[in-house]
Every structure is written in structure tokens, then in C-alpha cells.
Image: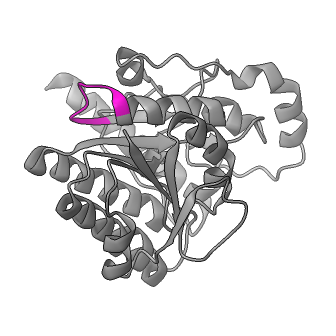
Amino acid sequence: MKTVLLTGAGGDVGRRITPMLKARYPKLILSDMAPFEPLHGCEFRQAELGDMGAVQRAVQGVDGIVHLGGFSVEGPWETILNANIAGCYNLFEAARVAGVKRIIFASSNHAVGYYPRSETIPTDVTVLPDSRYGVSKAFGEALGAMYAMKYGMGVTSLRIGNVGEKPLDVRRLAIMLHPEDLVQLIGIGLEHPDIAYEVFYGASGNTRAWWDNARAEAFGYKPKHNAETQAAHAEAEQKKAVPHPVGDYYQGGTFCSAEYTADLETVKATVARAKALAGKS
């Protein structure tokens, strides 16, 4: 990769990884909907994802894209639709026309948030989004798969947990992704010769992981960090949180419990019966 574009570079995750990406890809271009500092010596291209013309200008001359851009939390449908669905389409389509070779799509654990914390899930599970935001990430994964298969673009979707240097609570002990490990995953997606379309979990080598990241490991992923080294901090912070039967049961946490109107025990019983039927078939 000679030239790499990082969208959403002004966000928290983008700011954390820009110096490491710049060291690995000297011709790193940063993009966001508004200018920001510092740029670490990188070129900046302003683009709002809903503006196809701006996105087309941003991707010109680029070999690979790390697509962090979009609305990064739950929000109104109109906001999610413009930034994460229309905007994601604009990014992939502009990249196709421009001849971009590789795209890293920042998906999210919220695309599969309604799996219980008691389960360890691989990447090839049915998506169970826990929010409008999670639905948009499931859409982005599907869109990336189409562009990979139909147009030969190498695409990697990273179902990112929580990016940071320390787990903020007990949930993050399972899903923390240290920025150094995120950059390693990005490097695999941009550089590995055998990438067609892949889904990896964006998590460090956490002892309490809920996710089977065998696909990433098959491509050489060797995380350097484990949230368990800071378990005491996470457990102390957890004591400050208000318990919630739904948020504490599902992997997606508060994204699952927000606006929740189903009966949890009824849902659990129905799912258990469905699994039993599947086991008999």
C-alpha cells in the first residue's frame, strides 16, 4: 500500500491510531467532515460521507482505505441512514470507480450484540444487531462482501469491540481492543495477499473473550495485549454501574437494553426451544 486514506480520522479511534499508521504508511491521508489538528504531517481531505462528490475527491489516487467514518453510536434513523448507510455506499462506490485495491471497514460488535455473554461466537454467525447503529454495521459488512465478490476489491470487516489502552468495566474485559492490536489487524487487511472478503473480530487477546477470532489468527494475527492485566481496574469501575438484566445478559450491553420492550425470559425460552429443534434436524 503506497497511499492509504483514513476516514473518520478526527474521531477518538482515528486520533489514537494515526501516528502508528503514519509510521507504517508514510503517505497517509486523513479525512473527516471538518478540519482538525494535529495532522501528524499528513495530507487532509475534507469530506462529508453523504456528499458523493466530496467522497470521490477524497479517494482519488488511493490504494487502500481504512473506513472509520460515520456516526459512531446509536442515533436517530435519519442520522444513521445518511452517515452509515448512504455514506458507506458512497465510500465503496467511489473507491470502486477510483480503482482502490483494499478497504478496511470498521464494523462493530453491535452487529452481533444480541448474543448472550455466555456464548463464544465465531465470525460466521447470523447477525443479531442490537440497535439502528448495529443494523448499519451489518449493512456495511454485506456491502463490503458484495464489492469484494463482484468487483474483486479486497475487503476486511472488523467487528470492533472497545478501542483503548485499558478496560473501562467488566464488559470491556471481553471486548477491549488495544490501538496497537487494531493497527496490526488493519495491516493484515491492507497487505495480506490472500484477502478476498474476511470478517475479523476487533479484540485483543483477552482471557474473557466472547469471540472466536480464529479467522484473524489464520491470517497471522497475534495480539500483544490482554485486558485481563487490568482486571482490578475494570472490576472497580463496574461497581459504579447500575445493573440491568438485559444489558448485563447480552454482549451488546446498554445498546441492547436501550428502548427494550420484549420480555427477556420469554425471549430466552424461545431461543432455547429453537436451538433444541435445530439440534434434532
71 left or right, relative to 281: right
- The segment highlighted magenta reads 191-198
Q: Judge whether residue 192 is colored magenta.
A: yes
Q: Which residue lies at the image location 70% right of the left edge and 30% below the top edge? A: 173
- The percent coordinates of residue 247 (x first, y second) are 63, 50
Q: In front: 170, or 221?
A: 221
Determine whether 248 is above or below 207 in the image. below
Is residue 203 in sight in this rendering?
no
Q: Residue at x 66, y 43 (%)?
A: 19
Residue 177 pos. (x, y %) = 62, 35
Does the magenta segment cover residue 140?
Answer: no
Figure label count:
0
Looking at the picture, the colour scheme in use is one colour
The quarter of the picture where the C terminus appears is top left
51 left or right of 39? left
Viewer-proximal residue among 166 and 110:
166
Query: Against 178, is 68 above or below?
Result: below
Query: In the image as oriented, which residue stretches furthest toward the left?
Result: 150
Q: Is residue 2 left or right of residue 169?
A: left
Residue 43 placement: quadrant: bottom right
Residue 46 seen by the camera = yes
In the rendered structure, the answer to whether residue 70 lies left or right of residue 3 reads right
Q: Position of residue 259 (x, y in %)?
A: 57, 70
Residue 176 position (above or below residue 19): above
> Which residue is depicted at the point 64% across and 56% down?
254
